[in-house]
Amino acid sequence: MWSQRHGRLRPVGCGVEELRRRRREREAALRKARREQQLVSKRLLRDDAPEEADGGCVAPILGETEIQQFLRLSQRGTEEKERERALVTLRRGLQHPETQQTFIGLEGSMRTLVGLLTSNQALLQLEAARCLHELSHSEQSVVAEACLPATSYLLTYVSGHSSDLIELCLYTLGNLIVESEAVRRQLLPQGIVPALAACIQSPHLTVLEALGYALSQLLQAKEAPEKIIPSTSAGSSVLGSTLPQHMLQLLQPGPKLNPGVAVEFAWCLHYIICSQVNNALLITHGALSTLGLLLLDLAGAVQRSEDAGLELLVCPVLRCLSNLLTEAVVEAVGGQMQLRDERVVAALFILLQFFLQKQPSLLPEGLWLLNNLTANSPIFCTSLLSLDLIEPLLQLLPVSNVVSVLVLTVLCNVAEKGPAYCQHLWPGPLLPSLLETLAFSDTEVVGQSLELLQLLFLYRPEAAQDFLQQSGLQALERHEEEAQLQDRVHALQQTALHG
Amino acid sequence: MQLPPALHARLSAGPAATEPLPVQRDPAAGAAPFRFAARRVRFPREHEFFEDGDVQRHLYLQDVLTQVAGPPERPRVPEFTCQVAGCCQVFDVLEAYEHHYHALHRNVCSFCKRAFPSGHLLDTHILEWHDSLFQILAERQDMYQCLVEGCTEKFKTSKDRKDHLVRRHLYPADFRFDKPKKSSGCGHRSPSTSRSPGPPAALQELAGALGEGSLPLEGEDMEVCSEHTAPPAEPRGERRTHGHRIPSTICFGQGAARGFKSTKKRNKQQ
């Protein structure tokens, strides 16, 4: 599904270097935009900027007269083919920002376009919808907002039956949604949530993917946690609809799972969950078990090397699981609520290895899940030991400081459970690794290493002896002056020397 | 990162929860100056922890959703004709037929042959236009249902409903799929009742277009259906001529099943 789309829409005639450069630029821009999110930035969300028109299929920029001509021809041409051609030409012209500006400046142009959209001419309908789509993902607010008069119709067609048209309308709506809160303030009363809830039952994968996209844009909105997600808000809300159940159904692993569709809904679920509105509701719908099984499935796909683009799906799944595990209801004893299957740990490590190769920046997210799994769970801590995963975990230490801290935290989770656990931690590769991390300069890494040492010495006193013999004291000494570490360093020195 | 070989096998094996090792904590653990406490961590949506993953997500969106560039490659099939009686449109691509069918034949009113964008609007139309019981009931209770899916409000008149659509749902005042049924039959054109507000000039322009492409029927106003808004000022005479000029055997491939029924039948549908 994905590779099809990629193939279709990559710009032709761009060298690999050029593509990389563009990607780096866009990545930098996105990072900047995300950081500014703290300051409330509308622009952030409009990351659906069109590719610059490359040498490939370029249509000339259309002027006012030409636009009017094509519009008139589309409306009144005597031959169907002629009308179609006129509208296609207009649509191509609308790929240019200049044409877009001219178009929206013409009186009655949007009205005519809406007229064509709602006409009984099937092909004109589609072309008109494509024109609207071009306008919808303009970077210029004024152009995208010019589409507002069409939204009630877009929503009407989303409730229709033509999958091609529905798909277009959904992507257009998705683009408009991120435009501004003002747009959403119009779309919500117009009934976008019930329309999406009805549409999610469509059997068409292309429609579902488009729907997931539109919904994810809606859920990403800043006001979503207050106005769009909660089931108490007036009118329709996401949690008040049947959307959550259907979303989870679309994430069920198995032969019917479509990666392109799943990616969108996994992100939808992530936005809902991290908004912390009513995660208990999702858990009652079986979110934990669905996502856990999906995780196993994804690890299986990695094992079979069917992993193209898989990190795009794994990432939101990990986030959802990690956040859901913090819900109080999970603590309640009752088999289904808790994740107990130790295969989850096995799957997670397979995915960590996968991240290490493909996308190291996602390692922290994987380790975050591992922390949440092991923190309060003797079962999963035992799994780590019985599946021999301590050593692979240690191999991640050198990756980065953030990763080191997380690895050490997980190890602390295991060690703090007592002597039975620490028995498996020493003798072994742990102590040499700790001696290495003590040599790091990052205070947090060293601090977490000290915590782990305390637990180890407490529950496995023999380890302290070994530590001394391996020049542990010298390793500690270098941090004696560090304000954040001194107290703990001294305490450890005492313990090691005097027991 | 070397994973133990048995791990892969473990994944394929059935679910199991190992018997956990006994937990036995010492109060000194994590005691000052130490501070470790095992706990689950949650991150809210804005947290910088999510930066990398979010950036990847948006790069994906940008790569994939640049432009819905045009009709994707669709395999061609041997030419075939639309099977609906009276429609002679020909196709050689299945998806084009699917769209055609859904646009023109799917939600078609069996009484007046108008096509609607959705089943919901069709149902509403049939109820309000062709159900005689509806008119009777409407005199006593609120029967005009709001057109927005999910909204359960009902109204006494279609005007009240329209007001609701505009005020509560921010619909355009001239929403094309909400035109009131004309109470009088053909030959009566009351500009005041079934008109929508809007610049006459624009409507005229549309009217002209509609006059050509669709099938204007005598004395017909464009009510709740997917055809264009009727122009307020188009002279009746012109339309009548139009109606007579086009022989019924010619098919425009757009719900032509409507045909040119005699006005007598139309009059019955009040």
Image (cartoon, rainbow, N blue to C red):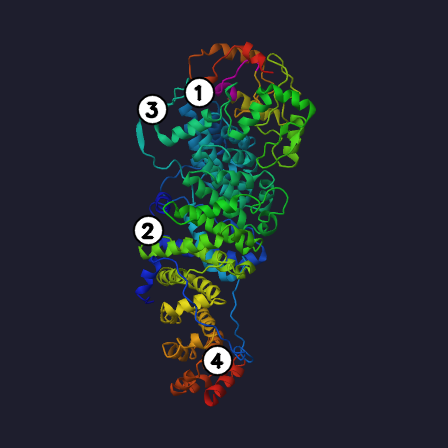
Location of mark 3 (residue)? B80
Q: Which of B156 and B158 is in front in this view?
A: B156
What's under tag 3, amino acid-wise? Answer: Phe
What's under tag 4, amino acid-wise? Answer: Gln
Q: Which is nearer the N-term, disc 1 or disc 4?
A: 1
What's under tag 2, amino acid-wise? Answer: Gly
Location of mark 2 (residue)? A15
Q: Which chain carries label 3?
A: B
Q: Quadrant of residue A124?
A: top left
Whether pointer 1 and pointer 3 mark residues with C-beta atoms closer than 8 Å, the reply is: no
Q: Is residue B60 rendered to the left or right of residue A111?
A: left
Crowdedness near tag 1: few (<14), some (14–19) or many (≥20) residues, C-alpha within 10 Å: few
Give the quadrant of the N terminus of chain A: top left
Q: Which residue lies furthest to the bottom in this view?
A: A498
* Circle nearer the viewer, 4 or 3: 4
Location of mark 1 (residue)? A78
Q: In this picture, which residue range is highlighted in magenta?
A: B210-219
